[in-house]
Amino acid sequence: MAYQISDECISCGACEAECPVSAISEGDGKYVIDADTCISCGACAGVCPVSAPSEQ
Ligand code: SF4
Ligand code: SF4
């Protein structure tokens, strides 16, 4: 399953640069993950300061 970013996201942008498949982009009020592109590597969760990304 793909990762999703919760409302805890503070839009710091750290995860976007870490994603190996460029699945993350800035959305409305938080960053968002394209579920069809995400390969569930977990890199975004590893760099997020507020643990917003999690596997759904
Ligand atoms: Fe990108 Fe990996 Fe996070 Fe999916 S789990 S959005 S592939 S960094
Ligand atoms: Fe949001 Fe976490 Fe990504 Fe920063 S690293 S943009 S807080 S999900």
Image (spheres, helix red, strand yellow):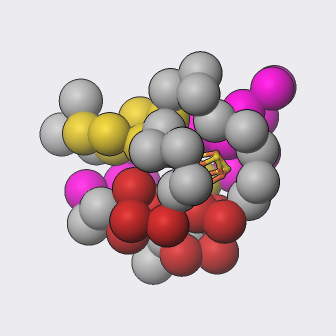
In this view, the residue in front, 19 or 10, is 10
* Residue 5 percent location from the top left of the image: 49, 35
Residue reaching furthest to the front: 49
Q: Is residue 3 above or below residue 17?
A: above
As drawn, is 21 to the left or to the right of 12? left
* Residue 38 percent location from the top left of the image: 37, 54
37 inside magenta stretch: yes
Q: Which residue sits at x=32%, y=39%?
A: 54
Q: Is residue 39 above or below residue 7?
A: below
In this view, the residue in front, 52 or 26, is 52
Q: Is residue 38 above or below residue 27?
A: below
Residue 51 seen in the figure: yes
Q: Which residue sits at x=39%, y=65%?
A: 46
Image quadrant holding the C terminus, namely: top left
As drawn, is 53 to the left or to the right of 3? right
Q: Determine the main secondary structure of the stretch shown in magenta.
A: loop
Numbered disc total: 0
The answer to which image quadrant residue 14 occupies is bottom right
* Residue 36 percent location from the top left of the image: 37, 44
Q: Is residue 9 above or below residue 13?
A: above
**Stretch in magenta:** 25-40
As drawn, is 45 to the left or to the right of 24? left
Residue 39 seen in the figure: no
* Residue 47 percent location from the top left of the image: 49, 67
The answer to which image quadrant residue 35 occupies is top left
Residue reaching furthest to the left: 1
Q: Which residue sits at x=54%, y=44%?
A: 50
Image quadrant holding the N terminus, namely: top left
